[in-house]
Amino acid sequence: MTGVDSPTKAHQGMPGEPALSTRAFYIVDVFAQARFCGNPLAVIVGDDLTDDAMAAITREMNYSETTFVGQPDGQGRWPVRIFTPGREIPFAGHPTIGTAWLIKEHLRTSGDNTVILRLKVGDVPVVFGDDGVGWMTPPVPVLGQMEPAQAAADLLGLPVDAIDTEFPVQTVDVGIRFTLIPLRSLDAVRQASYQRHLGAVRAQKGQCPDVLLFTKESTIDAAHHIHARMFDADPRVPEDPATGSANTCLAAWINAHNYLPGHCGEVLVEQGHFMQRPSLLRLRLTPTITVGGRVVMAAQGNLFGV
């Protein structure tokens, strides 16, 4: 098998019930060092469903994202659609790496260590090293508007002196947007409380309401370089345990503002600790930004009636 083979089949059900079609799904943990850490992702085999059906399945799974994988094209690229509980999005990091790993390990029987996903934002390659880490080459981030420190502090429910004003608060776009907020300490990151009413106002004004807050002052694991949290304006996914797209934006922001002067090699970003989902994201800043992480299988099964 070189593609997605027969995504649906009949399931008899209880005596007297009509046969139900079934569709395979997998759950993987992305940016995880162990099972039940990192960011969980549901991967559904087949993209032949209606948009409404994909949205309903995503709400049933109730993760930050669910992906739907179609048949590979003649060039070996795999079409993938990404849904949050609220909408379809053109790109996201942990769904990209997690889905590529699932394709490599379970949906194709041959091929090298590269998987190319056809996303709404364009083709995104993921290359897996011998150590099992998958590295995606995301779209090029675009740095946008800078904002006052006071507005950022208000959004996080923090005093303004918690903001590291040596560096800018700035929106960065990688197909989806994040407002990046540097903080002075790990305690400030821990104490931050996203003010949803202010996030709603930002959204109404066309400003980016989703934020990545972070610090280099100290980390939970001393071997890591940055501690981060990501708050989402969607109350159904209030905080994300590992956000590859936001960390892609962070990589571009680090490059632009020399946030880690003299640092060479990978930047290790920890996230999700305050959610009991510890995660590790790996950033390569040059010559091209790539974002890496491990994937662990958590579950597999079948959906009925789709």
Image (cartoon, rainbow, N blue to C red):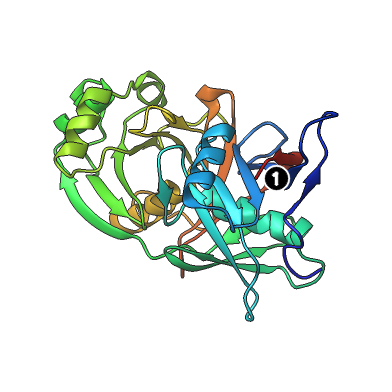
Q: How many labels does the image show?
A: 1
| Quadrant of the image containing the N terminus | bottom right
- 301 in relation to 278, above or below: below
Q: Could you tell me residue 222's position as x and y percent?
A: 56, 33
Q: Can residue 298 be seen in this view?
A: no
| Quadrant of the image containing the C terminus | top right
**Residue 200 in which image quadrant:** top left
- Residue farthest front in this picture: 16
**Residue 116 in which image quadrant:** bottom right
- 245 in relation to 220, above or below: below
Question: Residue 56 versus residue 184: which sits nearer the camera?
Answer: 56
Q: Could you tell me residue 160's position as x and y percent?
A: 19, 25
**Is the residue marked by circle 1 packed among few (<14), some (14-19), or many (20+) residues within 10 Å?**
some
Q: Is residue 146 visible?
A: yes
Residue drawn where x is 46% and y is 42% of the image = 84
Q: What amino acid type is highlighted by mark number 1? A: Phe
Question: Residue 221 versus residue 97: which sits nearer the camera?
Answer: 97
Q: Could you tell me residue 172's position as x and y percent?
A: 29, 52
Residue drawn where x is 68% and y is 39% of the image = 33
Question: Residue 65 versus residue 16: which sits nearer the camera?
Answer: 16
Residue 146 located left or right of residue 75? left
- Residue farthest bottom in this picture: 74
**Residue 28 in which image quadrant:** top right
Tag 1 secondary structure: strand
- Residue farthest right in this picture: 15
Q: Could you tell me residue 4's position as x and y percent?
A: 72, 63
Residue 177 located left or right of residue 148? right
Residue drawn where x is 77% and y is 65% of the image = 108
Q: Name the residue under label 1.
A: 25
